Amino acid sequence: MKRKLTSRFIRYAKINTRSKHDETGCPSTTVQFDLAHMLVDELKSLGITELSVDEHCYVVGKMASNLPEDHIAYGKTPVIGFLAHLDTAPDMSGENVRPQVIEKYDGKDIVIGFDESKKEKIIIKLDENPELGKCVGHTVITTDGTTLLGADDKAGITAIVTALEHIKNEQDFLHGDIYFCFNPDEEIGRGTACFPLEKFPVDFAYTIDGGSAGELNKETFNADSAKITVYGRDIHPGTAKDIMINANRVASYIIEQLPRDLSPEKTSGHEGFIHPTEMNASTGEACLKMILRDFEEKGLQANKVILEEIVSRAKKEFPGCSIDLEIQHSYRNMLLKLDQNPQVLKRLEDAVKKAQVDYQWLPIRGGTDGAELTRRGIPTPNIFTGGQNFHGKTEWLSIDVLMKTTEIIKHLVRV
Ligand SMILES: [Zn+2]
């Protein structure tokens, strides 16, 4: 299985599927179809025939139950779905990915390439990668230092396809209906924007997307975004006295007023934050974009109040300037709905134990497609893949951990 996972993952990783922010199309980039079509062909060649890719680049398919009618579990087995996303992060190039395979990793720092601009080696350091220390003897895959790897989330796709292949080929492997979906645009927060819910009639599902060995997720942030527009007054600086209202200064003031401890760089675990992500400013007008996060709804509301107070202080500080604050809903923590479906979580815990992995429920300090699906009625927790350092050149993946993920998928559906 290890060799199969390795070669399959490398094949997927080499296909550029980078998504793009601020595109209105669904999918955001057409390159994602390249992998989608390839997956359809591959799964068909494996004998899985009920699948298709739609115009929005969602690959959805089904492996029908093989339970005999006289089986005790016939008609009582839950219908389970699995999801992984096709796209890779917009932050970093995903073109010409050249995966490097390290067999029997020796437990030392890994030199993956050379940074010409900084004139220094690109190194995956053991002391910065505690998970790496647990992977001695594993097959580890890295980049050559020029792109991201795309283990996020081609590792997830690899595990699902390989599990389906095994389930299909293993004699006496009894299972109920299994659905799978490979979706575009997760990385830009639009993974479920055009989700064909009617083609995915499952009782519950699991996303296979990221994380250390044993990491399971049932919790995400509550998330909103804020857009602050500052209207100043521009005039020639030579005659500006008592007339100019410099939007640059107002915008800087607003950012400076944000509590520094309430930032992604100062928080971890269950702590929330307000994070300014973008600032476009000139003397006459400025636009600030921020994201607001908290695991508790009331924490998110408190962050909103902080922002409102800062804006009203700025208005007093810079008389005559006008400031618009617009808050938009992004997504909500899936914990509440998942806790109402304990059998979905219990089934996963049992499968992980059968694969002999120690598990931990950890909060996702971000979103997941599962959060939106959960909101729409399909409870969808997340399962680890063994990938690390996502969205960057030092991204790496342990194939041995991915092998466990693949086993877990099989345990989840085996009757
Ligand atoms: Zn991902």
Image (spheres, rainbow, N blue to C red):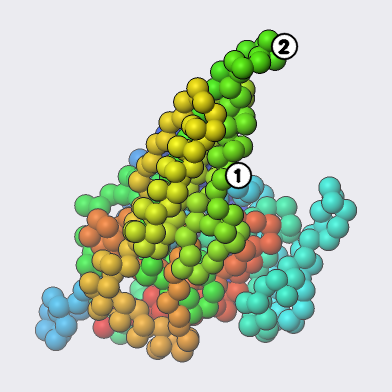
Up the image or down, 31 lies above or below 323; here it is below
Q: Looking at numbered disc 2 in the image, what kind of residue is underneath it? A: Gly
Residue 146 in picture, x, y percent from top left: 72, 52
Q: Looking at numbered disc 1 in the image, what kind of residue is underneath it? A: Glu
Q: Residue at x 49, y 42 (%)?
A: 310
Measured in 3D between alpha carbons, the distance from the residue under mark 2 to the one under mark 1, in whole angstroms, is: 28 Å
Outermost residue toward the right in this view = 119
Q: Quadrant of residue 144?
A: bottom right
Q: Who is closer to the viewer here, 379 or 27? A: 379
Neighbour class for label 1 at 10 Å: few (<14), some, many (≥20)? Answer: few
Q: Residue at x 72, y 11 (%)?
A: 238
Please give left or right for residue 285 compared with residue 173 in the image.
right
Q: Which residue is mark 2?
A: 238
Up the image or down, 384 lies above or below 134; here it is above
* Quadrant that contains the C terminus: bottom left
Residue 121 in picture, x, y percent from top left: 83, 61
Q: Which residue is mark 1?
A: 256
